[in-house]
Image (spheres, rainbow, N blue to C red):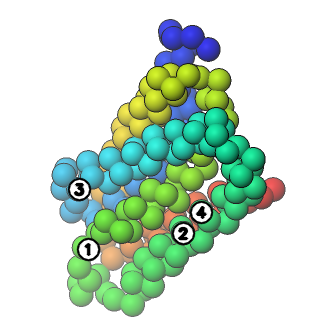
């Protein structure tokens, strides 16, 4: 592939496809913390964007260096996503069910949780390294940056939607957000295994 409109268009579409899991998790984060400020929103969307950029580059690197080891790892991707998102979603469900709306404080997702979410939602993007394997380093990096920008925008939309509904749902928002994360983990698992 060469530089041009099709390069940009293909990578925007690729970014949109890859960002769907991150969009759903962002929406769940917004549900969980309806009073979230713009700085926190940028932090969450930024973390997802960084992981969505790093994973394709890691995949590209593996293809150009140790691809046979990556092939063996690829079969575990759905399992990893299921465990990570199931754990975070289960924790949110547990916390949402054990306290009433007036007693709970919506502290929101802390950095370690956000990092786990970032890995869980972007781990399937490692396989994009195979898609961009024909690119030279600068093109692969540019593709990853386009994917990151698209992910950032899509996640910001998810956070805004989640915040809006989180305010309306109040005490049920954390339970709903946790349920969404578990469903996303199951969807990634089922799609990856079957």
Observer-nearest of 51 and 173: 51
Closer to the observer: label 3 or label 2? Answer: 2
Q: Which mark is residue 81?
A: 4
Label 3 or label 1, whichever comes before in sequence order: 3
| Residue 136 in the image: above or below residue 27 | above
Label 3 or label 4, whichever comes before in sequence order: 3
What residue does disc 3 label?
40
Image quadrant occupied by the N terminus? top right
Q: Which residue corresponds to the image point at 45% horizontal and 80% vertical from the top-left?
A: 91
In the figure, residue 142 lies in which quadrant? top left
Observer-nearest of 35 and 15: 15
Closer to the observer: label 2 or label 1? Answer: 2
Q: Which residue corresponds to the image point at 62% horizontal and 65% vertical from the top-left?
A: 80
What residue does disc 1 label?
106
Q: Which residue corresponds to the image point at 49% horizontal and 57% vertical from the top-left?
A: 119
Label 3 or label 2, whichever comes before in sequence order: 3
- How far is the residue under mark 2 from the one under mark 1? 21 Å
* Residue contact at pointers 3 and 2, CB within 8 angstroms: no
Where residue 141 appears, x then y in whole percent? 46, 29
Image quadrant occupied by the C terminus? bottom right
164 horizontally vs 17: left or right: left
Is residue 24 visible to us here? no
SS type, badge 1: loop
Label 2 or label 1, whichever comes before in sequence order: 2
Observer-nearest of 181 and 3: 3
- How far is the residue under mark 3 from the one under mark 4? 24 Å
What residue does disc 2 label?
84
103 horizontally vs 178: left or right: left
Where residue 62 appears, x then y in whole percent? 62, 43
Closer to the observer: label 4 or label 1? Answer: 4
| Residue 96 in the image: above or below residue 66 | below
């Amino acid at each position: 592939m060469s530089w041009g409109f099709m390069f940009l268009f293909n990578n925007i579409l690729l970014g949109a496809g890859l960002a769907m899991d991150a969009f759903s998790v962002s929406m769940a984060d917004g549900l969980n913390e309806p009073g979230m400020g713009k700085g926190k929103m940028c932090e969450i969307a930024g973390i997802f964007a960084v992981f969505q950029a790093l994973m394709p580059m890691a995949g590209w690197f593996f293809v150009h260096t140790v691809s046979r080891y990556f092939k063996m790892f690829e079969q575990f991707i759905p399992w990893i996503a299921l465990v990570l998102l199931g754990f975070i979603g289960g924790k949110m469900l547990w916390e949402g069910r054990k306290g009433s709306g007036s007693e709970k404080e919506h502290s929101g997702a802390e950095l370690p949780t956000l990092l786990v979410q970032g890995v869980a939602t972007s781990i399937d993007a490692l396989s994009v390294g195979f898609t961009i394997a024909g690119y030279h380093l600068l093109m692969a990096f540019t593709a990853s940056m386009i994917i990151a920008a698209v992910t950032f925008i899509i996640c910001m939309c998810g956070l805004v939607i989640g915040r809006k509904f989180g305010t309306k749902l109040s005490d049920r928002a954390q339970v709903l957000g946790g349920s969404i994360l578990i469903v996303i983990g199951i969807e990634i698992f089922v799609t990856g295994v079957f």
